[in-house]
Image (tube, grey):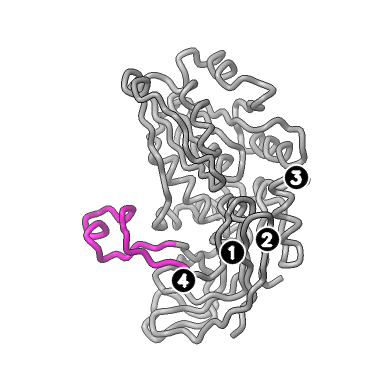
Amino acid sequence: MKSRGLYGKKFLDLREREIEVGPPDEDHVIVKVYACGVCGTDINFVRDWEGEPMPLGHEIAAEVLEVGKNVTNVKPGDRVIVEDCTMCGICEECKSGHPELCRNMYNMEGQPGMGQYMSVRFNCLDRFEGLDYVPACLTEPLAVCLTAVLSSDIPLGGSVAVLGPGPLGLMCARLARLQGAGFVAITGLPADNPREKARLEAARKLGCDMIIEVGKQDVEEEIKRKFPKGVDRVIVSAPPQSIYDALKIIRFGGIINFFGLHFGGQSVINVDINDLIFRKITLRPTFAEPAINFPVANRLLRDGLVDAGALITHTFGFEEARRIMGAVIDGSQPIVKAVMLPNG
């Protein structure tokens, strides 16, 4: 079948391409994509990426249409999440209990999640029930956040500051609370445009105890007014430059977890190694590939422990893609999380 899909590069250069999908080989499954979230990585591509147009979208909720002869874990009609990178299960790392270190991953084979149909290997699918497709597509980004929060080792009743109020930062703030944090702060740009205003309002709905508008308020001053020695944990979902603020507010012996990327030349920062050693600060990067924690993330959404309705503000189709992604970049609309509906 023909599948219409979306690709993009710098300067909002979005291109639609039609590819041929199927029939499935013995280990593959044909799925129809009903919802695909816009990730910060997609925004980085259409704002900063200078190479060939990249296939867009990897936060995918879909329906199984057809399965190969060896496939037994899903059947036509099942609702599934498509994992963008899946551990192989047979390498030395996987068999030693460390699938997160797998380097022989299955992937989306160059197909855009922001496309109508996909052919994916059977083990890249997670079945789900009791959840509509649109909220279900938050499973992948929520799993990214869950990986970061779990690896942060938040102490029971501890203090956490999340830098960056985008969808990932907001979900990290909520998960930090579920993981036992007694205090959660979040930082963001001033609420001077519709996007930032909507994000900070979402932070309030999700129960953040303190909201700091960077530029209008000094992050270190605000945090240390309540925690003079600094907070127990900092999670950085914002670009790498935000680690400077993290280093100012982390307590002695604290952990800074970070996963914010930048593809536009701002991925390098200067760090005082002596300061890290003398203050016993741990810098802990997380990269949620291969797919980890998808079933738990989906259950959190299904059970309402993470409120998808507080995050997803806009849905759109092919014709509106440039406008929506442009608005995410320039802040002209109150977009917290946008989700593409490739099949309408």
Which comes before the other along the chain, label 4 or label 3? 4
Magenta residues (range): 85-109
Task: Using the image, tell me which numbered label, if any, was put on residue 109.
Answer: 4
The location of residue 190, given as percent across then percent down, is: 70, 30
The kind of secondary structure element at disc 1 is: loop
Which comes before the other along the chain, label 2 or label 3? 2
According to the picture, the residue beneath numbered tag 3 turns out to be 334
Is label 2 or label 4 in front? Answer: 2
Task: Using the image, tell me which numbered label, if any, was put on residue 53.
Answer: 1
Residue at 50% across, 16% down: 227
Which comes before the other along the chain, label 2 or label 1? 2
Q: Are marks 4 and 3 in contact (CB under 8 Å)?
A: no
Mark 2 to mark 1: distance in Å? 8 Å
Mark 4 to mark 3: distance in Å? 33 Å
Which quadrant does the C terminus fall into? bottom right
Which comes before the other along the chain, label 1 or label 4? 1
Hey, what amino acid is under mark 2? Asp
Residue at 48% across, 67% down: 127
Which quadrant does the N terminus fall into? bottom right
Vertical position of residue 133 compared to residue 190: above or below: below
Q: Are marks 2 and 1 in contact (CB under 8 Å)?
A: yes
The location of residue 162, given as percent across then percent down, is: 53, 33
Residue at 42% across, 74% down: 121
The kind of secondary structure element at disc 3 is: loop
